[in-house]
Image (cartoon, rainbow, N blue to C red):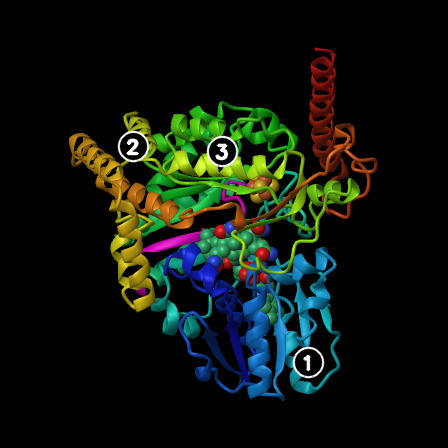
Amino acid sequence: MKVTFVQATNRFFADTQMFGVHFMPVWAYTLAAHLRTIPDLEIALFDDRFDQPDALPESDIYLFTGINQDYDAIVSFEAYLRQRFPKAIAVIGGPICWSYNMAGKIDSLSMFDHIVIGDGEILVTDLIHSIRSGRVLPKVIESSQRFDPVQSLPMDRELLDGTISRYYGAVLEVSRGCPFLCEFCDIRVLPDNNRAHNKPAPLIVEELDHLYDLGVRQCLFACDNFIGNAQWAEEVCDRIIDWKARTGKKLSLYTWLTINLARSPGLTKKLRQAGFDMFFIGVESFHQTSLLETAKVQNTTLDLIASIRKIQSYGFVVVAGLIFGFDTDPENVAEVALKGILDSGLISGDPSLLTALPGTPLYHRMKLSGRLRDAKLGLGGFKYQTNIRYLKAEHRIRDDFKTFVKEFNDGRYQYGRISSFYRCLEASSYIAPATAGYADLRKMFKMVFRTPRHIGLLLLRIGRLIQSPVRDYYILKALALTLRRSSRQKPLWFYFKFWLFTWSNSLMKYANLSDADFDIESVRGGFDVSTVVPAGYEEGSAEQIPITKIRSQRRLTTSVLKSWAASQTNLERSSGAD
Ligand code: B12
Ligand code: SF4
């Protein structure tokens, strides 16, 4: 019997978000390791980013995965497969299934023989056995329990070793879950996912060792929050530091974590010594009320800007997630974000628009207050499409974004960012990079040079960067600053090239941004702001989180929104009286 894993990807996003750099299909290597226990099973991987459709091997079963934005690509590839191998069984799993199920749209995947919701490790072997023995299986199969990562197996060597060189570095899943309660986040909503579930530290080191031997020098630690359990995070660092000392092997690491890292200088130092170069941190907003509205409390109980600077002072680059579109966003949200980025010395990260992910408290609130709109499946040609009706007028949201982009891409502003970042590195906590870094330009270019299409995109990127004399001036000025401040102990070239790369990303991404790129809506005239927290918001939740935690999040969101609504009403009254 033969099983083929199929990765069908939205090509537009694969090109424009990843710029020709592709990440490996972790799900396939993970599930394949479990399938190896089945005798006489042949396993193959088909990735449409590299393999031509006619290279799709004939198989008995095809296993698909996906995220929501891949919907169109998945559906069209499934149709192609049906036509070529009509007798084969097609199964789909992954984030798209969970998300569509939550949104009540699971029927849109009904072309598949089976749809799997939840972790695959436990049920994938049974699934294949059942199909092989001809047992009747339900259309929708829901995993009844979370997989405990303590039981994780190393990623499947056979599949991994034969395909790893196609991808940029490696992705290693290390942990699942996050203990925080942000209103918009769907991580907390997954069953039993409001706490950290961690892989054993020795297994992580074993995987790193193997990846290193395969030639991998960059590794993304996939998780929701690497410091969700600080004790475990420290143990992982200790083991990696020990492995580095024993073997002389080292990799550049990148992961996701939260701003409260700034409270733990000991852990921060160990992360640097272990080889971490970049962290994605959900900053979301530099406006305190917006953070409180969304219950991102960990960003409000410390000085956000000072904390980012502190983390960066060790030599890390913080890639910040930012969101526009919170109900309590100020009129000048773009200016607030631009100032926040500059003050904190962030050289990476830009905003997205608030979206209500199915299953989240935000989704519940939008639905109850009639502010949910039926966004299509797939973006349908828009760069920005969201499913909620904002309180601010549509044109204001678009203008905020455009104001942000215009200033953000300006040479003087970009120069300000890098010089502010360099000032972070003046602290005594600085530890110099020990590798080429997570974003290794040489490696990226090598990948890009494999296809004419990506070479074209690279030339376009360089053209966009240097076509303006003002930009050229600031690039040269930043280069001079870098050379002036660089030393053997502080090799700033490492950061300069990353800064230039992210700036050029932004020039590519936002080139010719116009109103037509936005499919967004706002509440219609006459919306009563006092209904911003609809009746029933604080009740009703299927989340597997202690009720006290759920209540505390909803109480906080409610109180912030209610006092904001009251202030708006007072403002309206006083302006009416004027
Ligand atoms: C690492 C990561 C990335 C990396 C690398 C992605 C990659 N290709 O490896 C980077 C940074 C590049 C990235 C980018 C993006 N990401 Co991302 N990412 C993740 C993250 C943190 C881990 C993914 C992972 O590898 N997990 C480990 C594997 C083993 O888990 P898994 O794929 O879910 O598979 C398990 C189950 O789902 C199931 N399963 C999966 N497939 C199948 C199939 C079958 C047949 C079966 C039986 C079971 C099964 O079994 C597996 C084992 O349990 C997740 C969040 C998370 N914690 O999962 C977000 C996540 C996947 N990303 C997400 C998003 C939205 C994005 C971006 C669109 C963000 C953006 N706006 O730019 C981009 C898209 C990039 C692109 N064009 O591909 C969303 C997807 C939500 C959705 N439903 O659509 C997630 C879930 C985060 C979230 N909650 O919002 N991401
Ligand atoms: S800190 Fe990040 S992962 Fe955790 S709940 Fe908030 S947004 Fe989600």
Residue drawn at x 57%, y 26% as measured from the top left: 331
Q: In this view, does 559 lie above or below 20?
A: above
Task: Kindly indicate whether the residue at mark 2 contacts the one at mark 1 (C-beta within 8 angstroms).
Answer: no
Q: What stretch is highlighted in magenta?
A: 213-228
Nearer the viewer's eye, disc 1 or disc 2?
2
Q: Which amino acid does label 2 sit on?
A: Tyr
User: Residue 255 at x, y = what percent?
Assistant: 44, 47
Name the element at disc 3: helix
Quarter occupied by residue 91: bottom right
Nearest the eye: 44 or 103: 103
Name the foreground residue: 449 vs 400: 400
Q: Mark 1 to mark 3: distance in Å? A: 46 Å
Q: Which secondary structure, mark 2?
A: helix
Say which amino acid is labelled 3.
Ile
Q: Which of marks 1 and 2 is nearer the N terminus?
A: 1
Compare marks 1 and 3 and give the one earlier in the sequence.
1
Give the dominant element type of the magenta stretch: helix, strand or loop.
loop
The residue that disc 1 covers is: 130
Q: Reading the chain from its start, which is encountered first: label 2 or label 3?
A: 3
Give coordinates of residue 427: x percent, y percent: 30, 25
The label shown at residue 415 is 2
10 Å crowding of disc 2: few (<14), some (14-19), many (20+): many
Q: Are marks 1 and 3 in contact (CB under 8 Å)?
A: no
Q: Residue at x 70, y 21 (%)?
A: 568
Please check the rendered image and state whether residue 285 is part of the magenta-colored stretch, yes or no. Answer: no
Give the numbered dot on residue 259.
3
Residue 270 position, x and y percent, is: 38, 38
Q: What residue type is labelled 1?
A: Ser
Residue at 39% over, 59% down: 170
Q: Kindly indicate the quadrant of the structure image that contains residue 249.
A: bottom left
Q: Work out whether 428 lies above or below 351.
A: above
Question: What label sits on residue 291 in the rendered view?
Answer: none
